[in-house]
């Protein structure tokens, strides 16, 4: 028998694993008789403290991994489902408004591109000109 | 078999993360189980530059993250112990210099990241020295008891419990009793309670 055929780590692991299994296979009564103080103390065992530390680690990991939520934007929300044609129609209703600049937009709405129509409509939603 | 069927079957037979958490929570009323896990973790890290506490912490985190599957019929402490043993076993196997062993005994996917992390702690001359000193310590400790020393040497050589029993002509009960004697003597010296 040669103990040089395995490296030191393997040798210590062979011993450690055998003794660890022996512990796990021992009855609770045996463990208690080896550790009589266990029955007496009411404080937590180091195993329980390690479990609490693990719970904290998981909690912190989860908190770090929650993605940052984009701020809610009512204008973006109201824009859902609105196409350029619908936005263009909405803008034409501004001609009845008292604000001269809005009347100007309404009068020129046919000359605006779809992108500009959507952008102006969104700005007006954000500024509260259009209500829900 | 369809991969989805296998996955469904696996999920039916394994605990969810919340079930694992509930079972671990329930262990708080059973201090002996925690003591067993602490001691077993310390033994698994014998001669390694890793503490039993750190090993237990790593494995508990993996279980709580759902990265370890636990069969429903398995006691939770046995599951945690098995995960700890598997992790250290993977670490030791990975360190084998023999290229054939590397090919045959690849670390499990479950363990590979943790093995990489722990492996760094073994790559020092100090760590190697600690392992050698631990072996020497055990040999010295049992030099006056031929039977216990032989059991230890057979263990270091990788003999299975059954092989050791056959080679030494021991019954299972005698073998278990000898292991307890080894464990108790070691623990008494470690805690300073000399006879």
Image: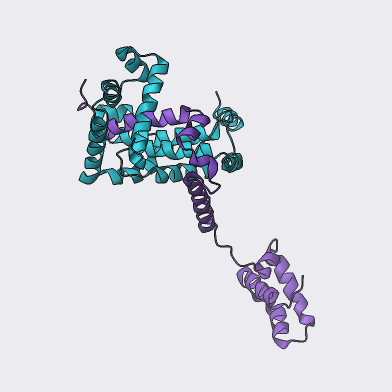
Compared with B47, A80 (above or below) is below
| Rendering quarter of residue B99 | top left
Which quarter of the image is occupied by the C terminus of chain A?
Answer: bottom right
Compared with A94, B66 (above or below) is above
Using residue A2 as the reference point, say whether residue A55 is left or right of it: right
Q: Locate residue B28, reporting x and y percent.
A: 57, 43
Residue A56 visible (yes or no): yes
Q: Locate residue B126, reporting x and y percent.
A: 22, 45
The furthest residue to the front = B195
Question: Can you tell which chain is drawn cyan?
Answer: B
Q: Locate residue A88, reporting x and y percent.
A: 71, 71
Q: Which of the colour schemes (rainbow, by chain, secondary structure, one colour) is used?
A: by chain
The furthest residue to the right = A96
Front residue of B8/B27: it is B27
Compared with A9, B60 (above or below) is below
Question: Can you tell which chain is drawn purple?
Answer: A
| Rendering quarter of residue B102 | top left
Q: Locate residue A9, reporting x and y percent.
A: 27, 35
Front residue of A114/B42: it is B42
| Rendering quarter of residue B136 | top left
Front residue of B66/B74: it is B74
Residue B90 visible (yes or no): no
Q: Residue at x 73, y 78 (%)?
A: A129
Q: Residue at x 58, y 62 (%)?
A: A69
Which quarter of the image is occupied by the N terminus of chain A?
Answer: top left
Q: Residue at x 26, y 27 (%)?
A: B100
């Amino acid at each position: 028998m040669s103990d040089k055929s395995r490296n030191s780590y393997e040798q210590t692991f062979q011993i450690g694993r055998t003794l660890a299994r022996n512990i796990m296979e021992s009855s609770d009564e045996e463990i208690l008789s080896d550790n009589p103080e266990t029955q007496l103390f009411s404080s937590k065992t180091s195993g329980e403290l390690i479990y609490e530390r693990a719970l904290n680690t998981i909690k912190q990991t989860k908190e770090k991994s929650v993605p940052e939520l984009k701020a809610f934007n009512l204008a973006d929300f109201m824009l859902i489902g609105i196409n350029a044609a619908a936005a263009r129609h909405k803008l034409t209703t501004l001609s009845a408004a008292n604000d001269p600049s809005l009347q100007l937009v309404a009068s020129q709405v046919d000359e605006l591109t779809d992108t500009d129509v959507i952008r102006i409509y969104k700005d007006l939603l954000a500024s509260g000109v259009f209500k829900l | 078999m369809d991969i989805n069927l296998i996955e469904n079957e696996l999920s039916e037979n394994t605990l969810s993360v919340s079930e694992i958490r509930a079972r671990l929570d329930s262990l708080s009323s059973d201090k002996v189980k925690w003591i067993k896990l602490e001691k077993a973790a310390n033994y698994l890290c014998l001669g390694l530059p890793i503490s039993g506490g750190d090993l237990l912490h790593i494995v508990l985190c993996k279980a709580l993250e759902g990265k370890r599957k636990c069969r429903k019929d398995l006691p939770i402490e046995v599951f945690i112990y098995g995960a700890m043993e598997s992790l250290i076993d993977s670490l030791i196997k990975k360190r084998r210099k023999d290229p054939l062993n590397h090919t045959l005994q690849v670390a499990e996917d479950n363990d590979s990241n943790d093995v990489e992390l722990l492996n760094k702690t073994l790559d020092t001359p100090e760590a190697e020295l600690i392992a050698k000193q631990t072996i020497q310590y055990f040999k010295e400790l049992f030099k006056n008891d031929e039977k216990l020393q032989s059991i230890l040497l057979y263990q270091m050589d990788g003999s299975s419990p059954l092989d050791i029993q056959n080679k030494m002509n021991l019954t299972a009960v005698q073998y278990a009793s000898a292991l307890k004697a080894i464990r108790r003597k070691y623990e008494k010296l470690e805690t300073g309670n000399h006879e």
